[in-house]
């Protein structure tokens, strides 16, 4: 049995306050091999303008540290922010990757958004589609893909050395867990995903994808498997699958559709690219009327 202590990558978090999203740069300090996780493209819904200020701060860090970005990783097709993966790829290089379940997500939203034959629901917009057990090492740091369905069917977690990037599964212990009411979401599946993540060593560092500052505290991004198992308000040791599913269903029924789901999903199923421009050279998002959410 391997009893070596786990290798520790460096982890640099970046907080996007408008959407409560944490992005990360994870790197092997020795070889400078790095991955970017869940980068955010600024988007003003009032004007329909995109911006790269937040992503450029992350790119500047990579340049200053002379990191070699091998991967730009999505934990899933986000419904609350647009991905900056294509912008960062053009600045830093690296391959844009997401979980293999994106095929299902693309098929679902191709239908919901009435996308035409020019949108291929085959994952070809990404450089790599990752599956459970795939290895994505960064220099001397072992990297593993862990399928993490529940919030969405394409969700994956990434484990680099002792650092686990959980995407939208659990939040900080006082923030609980991610909603499971999007198409392809399933609360029982999320419970089983979380049990798998909680089976990792207790000291594993856990980095969350969102923090909404419960109780008005400062945004936080890092905890441990031990802290989650002891104190996560939704799913800790002793909470049964049935009670978790009941809690999630009740809670999800009260949640509004995310502010940016309509633009976010249309970009993110294209690996973060905007829809192809119309004849006038302008890209447009479509708004399906009376399809998403509950009747008013
Ligand atoms: Fe999400």
Image (cartoon, grey):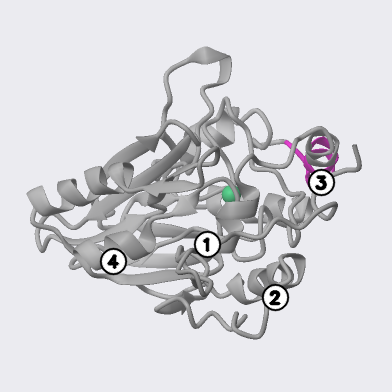
In the displayed orientation, state which residue is furthest to the front: 280
Q: What element carries label 3?
A: loop
Q: What element carries label 4?
A: helix
Q: Residue at 63%, 39% (x, y): give it.
A: 259
- List x then y, in percent, for residue 88: 28, 60
Earlier in the chain: of badge 3 and badge 1, it is 1
For the residues labelled 2 and 1, the Cα–Cα distance comes to 13 Å
Earlier in the chain: of badge 4 and badge 2, it is 4
Taking 121 as reference, is 88 left or right? left
For the residues labelled 3 and 4, the Cα–Cα distance comes to 34 Å
Residue 80's image quarter?
A: top right
Earlier in the chain: of badge 4 and badge 1, it is 4
Q: Is mark 1 on a helix, strand or loop?
A: helix
Location of the C terminus (image quadrant) = top right
Residue 107's tag is: 2
Q: Is residue 211 above or below residue 132?
A: above
Residue beneath disc 1: 268
For the residues labelled 3 and 2, the Cα–Cα distance comes to 19 Å
Residue 89's tag is: 4
Q: Residue at 64%, 72% (x, y): give it.
A: 106
In the displayed orientation, state which residue is furthest to the top: 216
- List x then y, in percent, for residue 253: 84, 38
Taking 186 as reference, is 264 left or right? left
Earlier in the chain: of badge 3 and badge 4, it is 4
Instruction: Give the class, few, some or many, for how many residues have Cα within 10 Å of label 1's Cα (few <14, many ≥20).
Output: many
Taking 168 as reference, is 162 left or right? left
Which span of residues is magenta-colored? 239-247
| SS assignment for the magenta stretch, majority | helix
Earlier in the chain: of badge 3 and badge 2, it is 2
Instruction: Give the class, few, some or many, for how many residues have Cα within 10 Å of label 4's Cα (few <14, many ≥20).
Output: some
Residue beneath disc 3: 293
In the displayed orientation, state which residue is furthest to the right: 295
């Amino acid at each position: 049995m391997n009893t070596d202590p786990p290798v520790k990558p460096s982890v640099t978090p970046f907080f996007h306050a408008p959407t409560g999203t944490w992005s990360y740069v994870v790197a092997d300090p020795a070889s400078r091999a790095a991955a970017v996780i869940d980068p955010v493209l600024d988007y003003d819904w009032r004007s329909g303008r995109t911006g790269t200020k937040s992503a450029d701060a992350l790119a500047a860090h990579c340049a200053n540290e002379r990191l070699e970005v091998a991967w730009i990783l999505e934990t899933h097709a986000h419904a609350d922010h647009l991905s900056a993966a294509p912008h960062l790829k053009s600045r830093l290089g690296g391959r844009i990757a997401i979980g293999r379940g994106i095929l299902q997500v693309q098929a679902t939203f191709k239908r919901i958004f009435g996308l035409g034959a020019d949108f291929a629901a085959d994952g070809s917009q990404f450089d790599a589609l990752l599956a459970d057990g795939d290895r994505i090492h960064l220099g001397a740091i072992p990297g593993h893909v862990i399928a993490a369905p529940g919030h969405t069917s394409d969700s994956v977690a990434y484990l680099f050395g002792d650092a686990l990037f959980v995407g939208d599964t659990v939040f900080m212990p006082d923030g609980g867990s991610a909603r499971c009411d999007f198409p392809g979401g399933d609360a029982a599946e999320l419970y089983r995903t979380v049990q798998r993540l909680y089976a990792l060593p207790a000291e594993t560092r856990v980095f969350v994808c969102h923090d909404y500052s419960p109780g008005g505290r400062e945004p936080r991004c890092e905890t441990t498997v031990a802290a989650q198992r002891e104190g996560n308000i939704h799913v800790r040791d002793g909470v049964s699958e049935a009670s978790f599913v009941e809690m999630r269903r009740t809670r999800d029924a009260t949640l509004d559709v995310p502010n940016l789901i309509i633009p976010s999903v249309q970009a993110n199923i294209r690996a973060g690219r905007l829809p192809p421009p119309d004849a006038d050279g302008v890209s447009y998002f479509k708004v399906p009327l009376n399809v998403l959410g509950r009747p008013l």
